[in-house]
Image: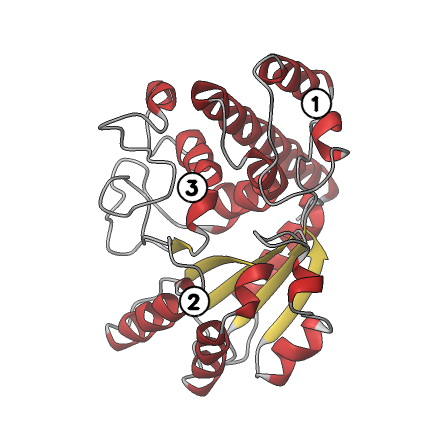
Amino acid sequence: MTAISSQMTSTTLAQRAHNIRRHALRMGQVQGQGYVGQALGAADLLAVSYFHALNYRPEDPEWEQRDRFYLSIGHYAIALYAALIEAEIIPLDELETYGSDDSRLPMSGMAAYTPGMEITGGSLGHGLGIAVGACLGLKRKQSASFVYNLLSDGELNEGSTWEAVMSASHWKLDNLIAIVDVNNQQADGHSSEILAFEPIVDRWQAFGWFTQRVDGNDLPALVAAFDAARNHPGTQPRVIICDTKMGKGVPFLETREKTHFIRVDEHEWDVALSNLDEGKTL
């Protein structure tokens, strides 16, 4: 890729990430709540996933040859909805229905309701195991599709996650790309204090995975990592560990005391949207 085309790619992805953040904030404003801190932090890795890495057809979410994106973290649904809206898999006008009765956008993601929502990830620690099973099935069908699985640092507490990690390397699932969002927050406090996960790179490598760690809010670094994961020549499963900042793009949310659920007061939603737009750099 030339320097000019690389810059164009970064510019396009920055716009996509900005739009994903904006969609998430608008959905949060509809209900007066939502996991917007996580959505703002994960917007860059979602932009790279949907607008650089994944093969899919917006008009046909069930296209058999698609790459799958599995959201293990069910409460991140607002973030994935924002990406699916930006990808035109979900119409923009459905944004206003977020969390409402009969909406296709429930507050916790459910595969039965939402186009493009591949799995129901409400019980944390199950997503990677489901991804392993899907990858085995795709291998047996001789499919060239990849499965991308977004999981959280808090899910590294779960034994089922490590069983899946071990299984994936045993079965040589080179069609599996795990993405770990490391924002150091979970329901009970700081993830690193609840159950220490460092040295995280060494641990994944010890289980036989091709492992990379990047700043999850650095678009060029994410593009390089996603490309390296997909093109890695070995038979290993691949993982990209992404250090992200909750509230990214909205300064007063970036600096607000970090908790698993960042509360936004009614008058702050418009301020957050204005801050996001004012700070946009493309």
Number of residues whose C-alpha sits closer than 10 Å to that of mark 1, classed few (under 14), some (14–19) or many (20 or more): few
Q: Position of residue 194 (x, y in %)?
A: 65, 64
- Residue at 40% x, 55% y is 70
Q: CA distance from mark 1 to mark 2?
A: 34 Å
Percent position of residue 187, x then y: 56, 51
**First along the sequence among labels 3 and 2:** 3
- Dot 2 falls on a residue whose secondary structure is helix
Query: Which residue is under mark 3?
Result: 77
| Secondary structure at numbered mark 1 | loop
Mark 3 secondary-structure assignment: helix
What residue is shown at x 54% (from left), y 80% (from top)? Answer: 234
Q: Amino acid at mark 2?
A: Leu
Q: Which label was assigned to residue 128?
A: 2
The answer to whether 144 is drawn above or below residue 254 in the figure is: below
Amino acid identity at mark 1: Lys
**Pointer 1 with pointer 2, Cβ within 8 A:** no
Task: Give the Cα distance between marks 3 and 2.
Answer: 16 Å
Q: Amino acid at mark 3?
A: Ala
Give left or right: position of 124 versus 246: left
Q: Is residue 279 left or right of residue 259?
A: right
Residue 161, horizontal then vertical, whole percent: 48, 72
Name the residue: 57% across, 71% down: 232
Identify the disc placed on residue 280: 1
Toward which corner of the image does residue 201 lie, by quadrant? bottom right
Q: In x, y percent, where is residue 59? A: 27, 35
Mark 2, Cα crowd under 10 Å, few <14 / some 14-19 / many 20+, is many
